[in-house]
Image: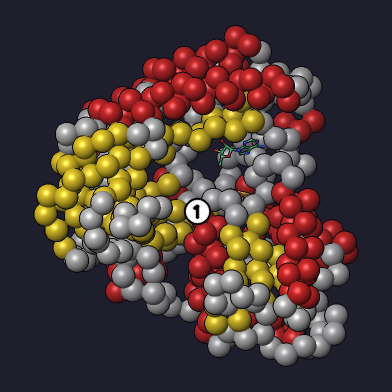
């Protein structure tokens, strides 16, 4: 690699989960603190960070083709852009990427990106570097303070996974479960609010496994943190994601009935409705124990909107076992859900299991599953008609003059009124589509 000027502009492209979006924002802030500014829309950046996801199919191939595209676009603009690969593919495949893609100057894992600034300095001196260390909790303390954020902001409170579901790369790419300390989180949340956040979504791969000590030194679970954050006056909404059924506890369930700012929404992946498949996946719950858990949430908060994740075509899944997944979907009535075809991940136990399922079978199962999920999402939206609720405006809609926000149940609600990002408006839900609702403005709650 040749020495170059220190980059003046950057762009971070994040793929995958919300935690990656959060990490991408923090990398941006770190580069800004180094005097590198966001490249203007439509202009090639001097430094491009690909913040990758490894959860499914073709993740590594996508990195190579994205790198090729960045180099080509840079050349066209008369540039030789510096390229950093971050995120979960960097963690899993970093060394291989360094070997195969000479245009890549930096590989930085999800637990090491606080060192990105130094790596950029090295890259400018012509030195390529890889950092996929997993130092415990060093990252957050070393990052610059939050400055300007969207009205709905993310806050990583817990990271990593010790559950080792047999299909999943996350325990390998994100490392062991850690909880960030209570006071650091309250401080960061306050700074997010000062920077414009009205809603905070607490993030973790197993967010409900978060634990810490409150200011009095008492051991608390996630509901303890939620209770403290709810005291921040300007913060209006709290959410959390993603939870694991095995870590769910009474305190958090009860918080849904007690803390007004905690939104009536729960994302609780089940993956399959078949107990045999769940066992093979190393999920520590059954279909029935999952349903019982949901009953407790509904008892605490009857209007709670439920969301889940599903995998079809896990190795050995029979037609009858897939039918059990449809049955659990029908039993729950999800407001929203994510469904995927099983994708063998290198190094995971399921990748070498017998009975890998043919793609056509997975395609067909996914279609059938999605038909059930779409039906339920539409039904949930229709059942919301006539309800009055607050909507937090997040962005302009697709049509001119349209504004879009989120209901407490995380539905997209659009308005034909002139509004602004960050408005919290009172609305009646008047029309329901499969993926959004129309709102009728009742009054402006706060600007
Ligand atoms: N194949 C397909 N889907 C997967 N997920 C995780 N690993 C895989 C895989 N190997 C899905 C799960 C998880 C969501 C984040 O991604 O449903 O909850
Ligand atoms: Fe993708 Fe999982 Fe990594 Fe998020 S944690 S970026 S979903 S592999």
Q: Toward which corner of the image does residue 282 lie, by quadrant?
A: top right
Q: Is residue 396 left or right of residue 128?
A: left
Quick check: 312 left or right of 417? right
Camera-side residue of 305 and 46: 46
Total number of numbered discs in the rendering:
1
Q: Residue furthest front?
A: 400
Extreme residue in the top direction: 320
| Farthest residue, direction left | 443
Q: Residue at x 77, y 88 (%)?
A: 4
Query: Which residue lies at the image location 35% right of the left edge and 40% below the top edge?
Result: 436
Rendering quarter of residue 402: bottom left
Horizontal arrangement in the rendering, residue 232 relative to residue 275 (left or right): left
Depth check: 319 or 285 in front? Answer: 319
Residue for badge 1? 18
Q: Secondary structure at mark 1?
A: helix
From the viewer's side, name the closer residue of 307 and 242. Answer: 307
What is the x, y in percent for residue 69?
75, 63
Q: Residue furthest right?
A: 99
Q: Is mark 1 within 8 Å of ligand 2?
A: yes
Determine which quarter of the picture holds residue 264: top left
Q: Give percent across and percent down for residue 330.
A: 41, 17
Categorize mark 1 by other alpha carbons within 10 Å: few (<14), some (14-19), many (20+): some
- Residue at horizontal 67%, vertical 23%? 362
Does residue 402 lie above or below 308 as drawn? below
Tell me the residue at 82%/71% (across/down).
103
Residue 177 visible in the shown view:
no
- Image quarter where the N terminus lies is bottom right
Residue 317 in view (yes/no): yes
Relative image position of residue 100 (x, y in whole percent): 87, 61
């Amino acid at each position: 690699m040749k020495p170059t000027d220190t980059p003046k502009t950057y762009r971070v492209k994040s793929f995958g989960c919300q935690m990656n979006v959060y990490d991408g924002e923090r990398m941006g802030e770190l580069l800004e603190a180094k005097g590198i500014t966001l490249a203007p829309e439509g202009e090639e950046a001097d430094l491009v960070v690909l913040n990758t996801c490894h959860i499914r199919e073709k993740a590594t191939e996508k990195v190579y083709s994205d790198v090729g595209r960045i180099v080509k676009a840079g050349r066209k603009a008369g540039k030789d852009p510096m390229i950093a690969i971050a995120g979960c593919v960097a963690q899993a495949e970093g060394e291989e990427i360094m070997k195969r893609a000479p245009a890549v100057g930096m590989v930085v894992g999800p637990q090491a990106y606080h060192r990105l600034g130094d790596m950029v300095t090295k890259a400018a001196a012509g030195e390529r570097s890889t950092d996929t260390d997993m130092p415990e909790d060093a990252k957050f303390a070393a990052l610059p303070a939050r400055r300007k954020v969207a009205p709905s902001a993310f806050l990583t409170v817990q990271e990593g996974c010790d559950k080792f579901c047999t299909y999943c790369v996350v325990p390998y790419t994100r490392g062991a479960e850690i909880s960030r300390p209570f006071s650091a989180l309250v401080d960061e949340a306050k700074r997010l609010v000062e920077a414009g956040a009205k809603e905070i979504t607490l993030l973790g791969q197993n967010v409900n496994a978060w634990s810490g000590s409150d200011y009095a030194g008492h051991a608390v679970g996630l509901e303890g943190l939620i209770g403290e954050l709810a005291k921040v006056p300007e913060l209006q909404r709290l959410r959390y994601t993603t939870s694991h059924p095995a870590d769910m506890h009474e305190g958090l369930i009860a918080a849904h009935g007690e803390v007004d700012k905690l939104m009536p929404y729960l994302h609780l992946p089940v993956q399959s409705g078949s107990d045999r498949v769940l066992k093979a996946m190393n999920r520590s719950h059954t279909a029935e124990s999952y349903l019982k858990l949901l009953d407790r949430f509904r008892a605490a908060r009857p209007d709670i909107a439920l969301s889940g994740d599903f995998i079809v075509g896990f190795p050995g899944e029979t037609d009858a076992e897939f039918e059990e997944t449809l049955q659990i979907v029908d039993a729950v009535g999800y407001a929203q859900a994510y469904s995927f075809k099983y994708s063998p991940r290198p190094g995971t136990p399921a990748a070498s299991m017998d009975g890998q399922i043919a793609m056509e079978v997975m395609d067909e199962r996914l279609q059938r599953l999605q038909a059930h999920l779409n039906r339920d999402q539409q039904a949930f939206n229709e059942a919301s008609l006539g309800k009055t609720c607050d909507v937090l405006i997040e962005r302009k809609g697709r049509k001119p003059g349209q504004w879009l926000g989120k209901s407490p149940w995380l539905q997209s609600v659009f308005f034909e009124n002139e509004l602004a990002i960050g408005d919290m408006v009172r609305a009646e839900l008047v029309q329901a589509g499969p993926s959004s609702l129309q709102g009728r403005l009742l009054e402006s709650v706060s600007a």
